[in-house]
């Protein structure tokens, strides 16, 4: 048990367990249903050296980064503006929660009509997935601030810019990072979904093509690559969030 308390040991143990479960599933289901861990990792190692595969990674990465920037900046703007006013937050909260619970895939035809097929559509679909959780967590973080802080800012007649950058953001940053962490994963999901249904390049396009061809190695390889990226990014943001909470606690 003490070994699992060391940094990284629990993560390695979890990866080992997942690989064992994956191998057991492969042995029970067979190669027609799922590729083995060894063959998947071998396929992925070969593809990562292929320039043609790098083109698809770049297509997904560029669309994802643009969608993430829109989701984070838009979510922060909505959350901060709504969090500054009790009336605004009471009005915005049910609308945001309803939008968050709605299936985004049902809106994809509308996204295609508005933005067309290609980069704009998958960027918009990715941002649509990520912007709402960032806005909700930002608004909730602002509402959770001690009222004395905002009252003091009002007494001192601080302008809106100073209230946001000197009071709201520093105090609410740990909770905002939590929302960004969720937004990072959801934006990636939205971007890949956009590529699956309306693009001729990207990892989502490769995944959809592999599903049509029943290429289990490609399906598992692309999935592993996406999961590895999402897990690494989420782990880094989680470490930053914990550090911010420790600093705020002191």
Image (spheres, rainbow, N blue to C red):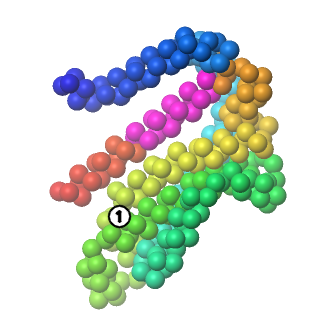
For the C terminus, the image quarter is bottom left
Residue under the image location 48 percent in, 79 percent down? 88
Depth check: give the residue in front, 106 or 199. Answer: 106
Depth check: give the residue in front, 240 or 218. Answer: 218
Residue under the image location 77 percent in, 59 percent down? 110
Magenta portion: prevailing SS class: helix
Q: Position of residue 58 (x, y in %)?
A: 66, 36
35 relative to 170, above or below: above
Horizontal side of residue 68 vs 51, given as left or right: left
- Residue 240 highlighted magenta (yes or no): no
* Residue 56 in which image quadrant: top right
The secondary element bearing badge 1 is classed as: helix
Query: Residue extending furthest front?
Result: 28
Number of other residues with Cα within 10 Å of mark 1, as a class: few under 14, some 14 to 19, many 20 or more: many
Q: Is residue 162 visible?
A: no
25 relative to 63, above or below: above
- Residue 233 highlighted magenta (yes or no): yes
Magenta span of residues: 220-236
* Residue 29 in which image quadrant: top right
Residue under the image location 24 percent in, 58 percent down? 248
Horizontal side of residue 69 vs 144, given as left or right: right
88 relative to 138, above or below: below
Q: Which residue position is annotated with label 1?
A: 172
240 relative to 29, above or below: below
Q: Position of residue 83 (x, y in %)?
A: 43, 74
Q: Is residue 232 visible?
A: yes
Depth check: give the residue in front, 114 or 165. Answer: 114
Horizontal side of residue 85 vs 223, given as left or right: left
Q: Position of residue 22 (x, y in %)?
A: 50, 19
Horizontal side of residue 56 vs 7, given as left or right: right
For the N terminus, the image quarter is top left
Q: Position of residue 147 (x, y in %)?
A: 28, 78
């Amino acid at each position: 048990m003490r070994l699992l308390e060391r940094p990284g040991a629990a993560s390695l143990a979890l990866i080992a367990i997942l690989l064992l479960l994956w191998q057991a599933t492969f042995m029970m289901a067979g190669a027609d249903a799922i590729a083995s861990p060894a063959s998947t990792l071998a396929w992925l190692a070969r593809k990562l050296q292929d320039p043609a595969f790098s083109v698809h990674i770049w297509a997904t990465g560029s669309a994802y980064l643009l969608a993430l920037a829109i989701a984070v900046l838009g979510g922060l703007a909505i959350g901060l503006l709504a969090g500054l006013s009790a009336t605004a937050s009471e009005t915005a909260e049910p609308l945001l929660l309803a939008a968050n619970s709605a299936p985004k895939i049902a809106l994809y035809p509308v996204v295609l009509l508005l933005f067309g097929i290609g980069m704009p559509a998958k960027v918009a679909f990715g941002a649509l997935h990520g912007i709402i959780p960032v806005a909700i967590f930002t608004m909730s973080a602002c509402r959770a601030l001690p009222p004395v802080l905002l009252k003091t800012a009002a007494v001192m007649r601080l302008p809106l810019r100073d209230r946001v950058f000197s009071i709201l953001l520093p105090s609410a940053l740990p909770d905002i990072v939590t929302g960004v962490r969720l937004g990072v994963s959801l934006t990636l999901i939205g971007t890949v979904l956009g590529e699956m249904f309306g693009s001729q390049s990207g990892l989502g396009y490769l995944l959809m093509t592999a599903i049509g061809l029943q290429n289990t190695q490609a399906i598992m390889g692309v999935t592993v690559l996406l999961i590895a990226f999402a897990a690494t990014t989420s782990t880094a943001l989680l470490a930053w969030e914990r550090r911010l909470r420790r600093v705020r606690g002191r």
